[in-house]
Image (cartoon, rainbow, N blue to C red):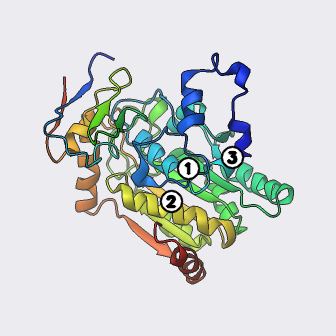
Amino acid sequence: MSKDFLRISPAFEDIMPAEYRELVASGPYGKGYGISDLGSHKELLEEHPLCAGCGLALSLRLTLSVLPAPEDTVIVGSTGCSALAFPQVALHNIHSLFGNQNAVAAGLKRALKLRFPDKHKDVVVVAGDGATADIGLDMVMQSWFRGELITTIMLDNEAYANTGGQESGMSPKGAVLNMAPKGKKFQKINMPELAREAGCVYVAAVSPANPKRLGKAIRRAILVAREVGPTYVQIFAPCPTNFKFKPQETIKRIKEREKDGTYLTREYISQEAQEYLAAMEGGNKDE
Amino acid sequence: MYGAVKVDEEKCNGCKVCVFACPDPNVLTLLKTKKITVNQDRCKACGLCASVCPKEALTVN
């Protein structure tokens, strides 16, 4: 997408929606904003219908604010809570069939590579835990085996939240939900380890309780996926509606889970990715 | 929305911790005055910003 597309024709200036005009005047396109610039510019996400205190909405907002090149990014989403927010995102995005997100993204990345051979087009998959770890695990794993140059971001709210609260593979053992009254009987899937073994060159598990770290992980994941190989970031985003806690306790809950060791924040960088990042970050101290 | 967060401008020092904790975009903004301003029409009153504010400058009514 060229930045010129974002200009409004002078004849239409007075009838365009206020949000669009704000986006043109103070949007983040082409400015290279990072996470510390939040609050001083118009964000890519607009007013969304997700619940009050939603950890997923917070993660999505922070994710969108650290994209290295928002005008050259395509987001591929899948069914889930995050899909409710995608119509409000001012980026190219594709809503794929449930679980197909990585297959769609892989094809898209190849097509963009042919169409724009001299340009970096970032294809970022943003999907929930159901789409990534349960229904779409096949497509996700195969895209990693093939070494597709895409970034997979999982917003892990530990349940199928927008269909009433069924247990997912990422729910912790013993979790009791609306539609899982007996409690979950097996362990949470260890996705970061799976990703590492399946060929991802950069793997991180982060949470919005530490926004700087989250921003750094996502930026690194997208930069590495441009040249080196597939990358995976898992973001812990607890759901106050289905896990029945107060909306103001979302961040407190993340910190508790990190403290008692049931959610580990970690980062794995392969040798190749390390060298690539060292070359990239050496020249730019901001990242 | 029926509730919204309010800023005590005397206590706010513009550290922006609340901006990183708000799940809704464009609600909390930091203008040139170095104090947080709230877009009260869009605030969902979840209270996450108030729970992380180190100066206790934010209250949800």
Amino acid type at image mark 1: Asp
Q: Relative to residue A14, is residue B53 drawn left or right?
A: left
Disc 1: host chain: A
* Quarter assignment of residue A57: top left
Mark 3 in CB contact with mark 1 (< 8 angstroms):
no
Number of numbered discs: 3
**Which residue lies at the image location 54% right of the left edge and 31% below the top edge?**
A22
Mark 2: few, some, or many residues within 10 Å (few <14, many ≥20)? many
Q: Residue furthest right?
A: A114
Q: Which mark is residue A218?
A: 2
Do labels 2 and 3 touch, CB within 8 Å?
no
Residue at screen point 76% across, 61% down: A119
Between A102 and A123, the residue placed more toward the observer is A123
Sequence-first tag of 2 and 1: 1
**Horizontal and vertical percent for residue A47?**
47, 28
Q: Tell me whether the residue at label 2 lies in contact with that at label 1, contact meaning CB atoms closer than 8 angstroms.
A: no
Mark sitting on residue A3: none
Say which mark, if any, is on residue A134: 1
**Which mark is in front, 2 or 1?**
2
The crowding category of the residue bearing disc 1, from other C-alpha atoms within 10 Å (few below 14, some 14 to 19, many at least 20), is some
Marks 2 and 3, the one that precedes in the sequence: 3
Instruction: Examine the image and state in which quarter residue A240 appears.
Output: top left
Q: Mark 2 vs mark 1: same chain?
A: yes
Where disc 3 sits, the SS reads loop
Q: CA distance from mark 2 to mark 3?
A: 22 Å
Q: At which x and y percent is residue A16?
A: 63, 20
The spot of residue A234 in percent (x, y) is 47, 57
* Residue matched to label 3: A100
Tell me, yes or no, if residue A83 can be seen here.
no
Q: Is A106 displayed left or right of A200 in the figure?
A: right
